[in-house]
């Protein structure tokens, strides 16, 4: 029989977990991807871990967080276009008539030719601030954690503790879904495409060249061209979910983000080791006697009476987490 | 089901008592010191110094020079003796035994074995009192009478060099109970009390003296020692949670706190919002 036994219910454990593991300030992330060599997508966001919605103890030393609640603080989609360079060859704008006495047949105003869309990306990045639809972004995260107890020394206080950690073994982030009930998304996307159109037109040094370039691209308008590149059709929600989940792989970004953050977290529980039965304190010398060496001051500081914690263990059994340990010199 | 459960064995508590005994002896040795008279080269008194007399020698603390051995007590007075008397009370052994009893052999007066949910406590107290040498007392009276004519000097305590010692073994049996007082809130105010079922002093006579000492010891155990033990366990549980929560004993359990299977057990609920 061990000297001391604690048992903590799932409810109390969840309260302790939700005190130790929420992340504030929020966790920023940044990711980008290139699709088909033409469209470049990036995402800039920030989330915070709000806590466990539901915790289930498993036998042994693992537990399952079936609903890890996260909140979105920022969501900005970036996109750009890496359009293949278009070379417009040189030609003569004004050529002298063959029968002219002056430089007959010669080109007196040549167009030297140019190559456009040589940047990477050529257009953008255009930012779509999606903060307005954050309330409609649904993220379902779950994870399996392993409980572990280890002795550590606090760098600031210098005290040692037996600390019980919940180390994530696996985090699973479902593809995020968007339920834009207020229909804000189409306006946001259209505004972004309009900005992209303006940027594309800015690349063309002469207004008359728009038609030339569009004829090269085989589309009637710049906007139509960009919408086609972005593969945007009627369903904006579906398009955005596809971009975030498939093109960018935001679920993997979030998984790594949450995993990294949780590995850095404080302990869920901690027990001071050595455990002080009588804390250190000052005593008035006049009230005591029998000092091995007579004190030179009216007050002296006596050390704590503390015993080491031995054989510490933490494990789950049915609906409780059991922590057991012995005392020793 | 309770949110938190904590249990500590009687063996662990007894180990802690022994551990503390070797490191904080002042928690176990209560002394009203006598006086050592300091003299000059010609034998004339020059002053006094505390003389810490005890019946059993106390080793130095394992924790170093700042740990004293004795807690100072006030000397007591006796009519007819113009100075106070030194004494010492030493707890030389203390053993706690939770149901089922297997650490303390109770005397027949305590009606062994232990009942369910009961605990036993054995404390060996070593008392030391001075013998008031009649000649010494007379000398002090004469000295103080003479001194009062010239200077207001009085001996604060009888200067002796040894004590008359005797041991008293105290056996107590009891159980824990919770007194709940409605507060108007969701949870009542809960006070943990010790109900002392029996307290026996071995080999003390007359009965009146035994009864009086039993009264003092019962009050001490009931009001201080054992409630502190339960609260200590409660605090251990909560401090380990590392949370600022308001715990309260889980209601509707047959025994909470409980004394069973050699453990003191506490079930707590915490307010989690």
Image (spheres, rainbow, N blue to C red):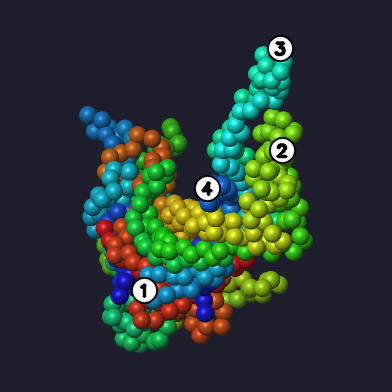
Disc 2 and disc 4: Cα gap in Å?
23 Å
In the displayed structure image, the side of residue B93 where residue A211 appears, left or right? right
In the rendered image, the vertical position of residue B172 relative to residue A190, given as above or below: below
Which SS class for mark 1?
A: loop
Q: Position of residue B265 (x, y in %)?
A: 43, 75
Q: Earlier in the sequence, mark 2 or mark 1?
A: 1
Query: How many residues crowd around disc 4 within 10 Å: few (fewer than 14), some, or many (20 or more)?
Result: few
Mark-to-mark CA distance, 3 and 2: 37 Å
Measured in 3D between alpha carbons, the distance from the residue under mark 4 to the one under mark 3, in whole angstroms, is 53 Å
Residue at disc 4, secondary structure: loop
Q: Upstream in the sequence, badge 4 or badge 1?
A: 4
Q: Establish whether labels 3 and 2 are both on one chain.
A: yes
| Residue highlighted by disc 3 | A101
Q: Residue under label 4, please give it.
A: A37
In contact (CB < 8 Å): disc 1 and disc 3: no
Q: Check whether the beta carbons of the residues at disc 3 and disc 2 lie within 8 A of each other.
A: no
Q: Work out whether mark 1 precedes mark 3 in sequence or the reverse, and give the earlier one.
A: 1
Judge if badges 2 and 1 mark residues of a common chain. Answer: yes
Q: Residues within 10 Å of mark 2 (few under 14, many from 20)?
A: some
Identified at 43% across, 54% down, the residue is A263
Per the image, the residue denoted by label 1 is A60
Of pointers 2 and 4, the one earlier in the residue sequence: 4
């Amino acid at each position: 029989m061990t000297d001391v036994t604690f048992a903590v219910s799932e409810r109390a454990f969840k309260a302790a977990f939700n005190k130790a593991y929420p992340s504030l300030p929020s966790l920023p992330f940044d990711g980008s991807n290139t699709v088909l060599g033409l469209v470049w997508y990036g995402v800039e966001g920030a989330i915070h871990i709000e806590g466990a919605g539901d915790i289930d103890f498993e036998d042994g030393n693992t537990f399952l967080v079936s609903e890890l609640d996260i909140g979105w603080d920022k969501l900005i989609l970036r996109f750009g276009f890496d359009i293949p360079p278009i070379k417009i060859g040189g030609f003569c704008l004004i050529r002298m008539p063959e029968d002219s006495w002056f430089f007959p047949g010669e080109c007196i105003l040549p167009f030297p030719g140019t190559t456009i869309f040589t940047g990477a990306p050529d257009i953008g990045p255009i930012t779509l601030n999606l903060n307005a639809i954050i309330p409609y972004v649904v993220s379902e995260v779950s994870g399996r954690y392993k409980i572990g107890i280890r002795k550590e020394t606090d760098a600031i206080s210098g005290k040692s503790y037996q600390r019980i950690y919940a180390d994530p073994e696996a985090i699973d982030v479902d593809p995020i879904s968007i339920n834009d009930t207020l229909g804000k998304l189409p306006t946001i996307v259209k505004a972004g495409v309009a900005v992209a159109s303006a940027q594309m037109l800015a690349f063309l040094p002469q207004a008359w060249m728009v038609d030339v370039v569009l004829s090269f691209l085989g589309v009637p308008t710049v906007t139509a061209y960009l919408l086609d590149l972005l593969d945007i059709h009627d369903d904006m929600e579906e398009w955005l979910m596809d971009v975030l989940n498939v093109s960018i792989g935001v679920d993997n970004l979030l998984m790594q983000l949450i995993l990294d953050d949780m590995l850095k977290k404080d302990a869920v529980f901690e027990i001071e080791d050595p455990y002080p039965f009588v804390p250190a304190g000052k005593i008035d010398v006049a009230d005591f006697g029998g000092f091995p060496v007579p004190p030179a001051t009216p007050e002296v500081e006596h050390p704590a009476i503390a015993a080491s914690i031995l054989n510490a263990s933490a494990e789950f059994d049915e609906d409780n987490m059991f922590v057991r340990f012995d005392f020793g010199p | 089901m309770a949110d938190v459960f904590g249990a500590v064995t009687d063996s662990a508590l007894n180990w802690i008592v022994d551990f503390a005994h070797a490191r904080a002896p002042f928690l176990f040795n209560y002394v009203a010191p006598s006086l050592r008279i300091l003299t000059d080269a010609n034998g004339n008194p020059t002053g006094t110094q505390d003389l810490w007399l005890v019946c059993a020698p106390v080793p130095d603390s394992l924790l170093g020079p700042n740990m004293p051995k004795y807690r100072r007590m006030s000397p007591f007075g006796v009519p007819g003796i113009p100075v106070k008397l030194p004494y010492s009370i030493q707890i030389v052994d203390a053993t706690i035994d939770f149901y089922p009893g297997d650490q303390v052999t109770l005397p027949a007066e305590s009606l062994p074995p232990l009942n369910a949910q009961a605990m036993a406590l054995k404390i060996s107290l070593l008392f030391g009192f001075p013998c008031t040498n009649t000649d010494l007392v007379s000398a002090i009276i004469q000295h103080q009478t003479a001194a009062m004519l010239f200077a207001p000097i009085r001996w604060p305590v009888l200067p002796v060099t040894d004590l008359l010692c005797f041991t008293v073994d105290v056996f107590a049996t009891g159980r824990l109970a919770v007194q709940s007082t409605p507060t108007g809130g969701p949870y009542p105010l809960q006070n943990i009390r010790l109900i002392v079922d029996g307290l026996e002093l071995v080999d003390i006579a007359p009965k009146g003296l035994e009864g009086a000492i039993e009264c003092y010891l019962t009050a001490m155990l009931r009001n201080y020692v054992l409630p502190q033990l339960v609260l200590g366990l409660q605090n251990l549980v909560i401090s380990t949670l590392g949370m600022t929560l308001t715990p309260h004993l889980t209601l509707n359990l047959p025994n909470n706190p409980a004394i069973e299977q050699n453990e003191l057990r506490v079930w707590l609920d915490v307010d989690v919002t």
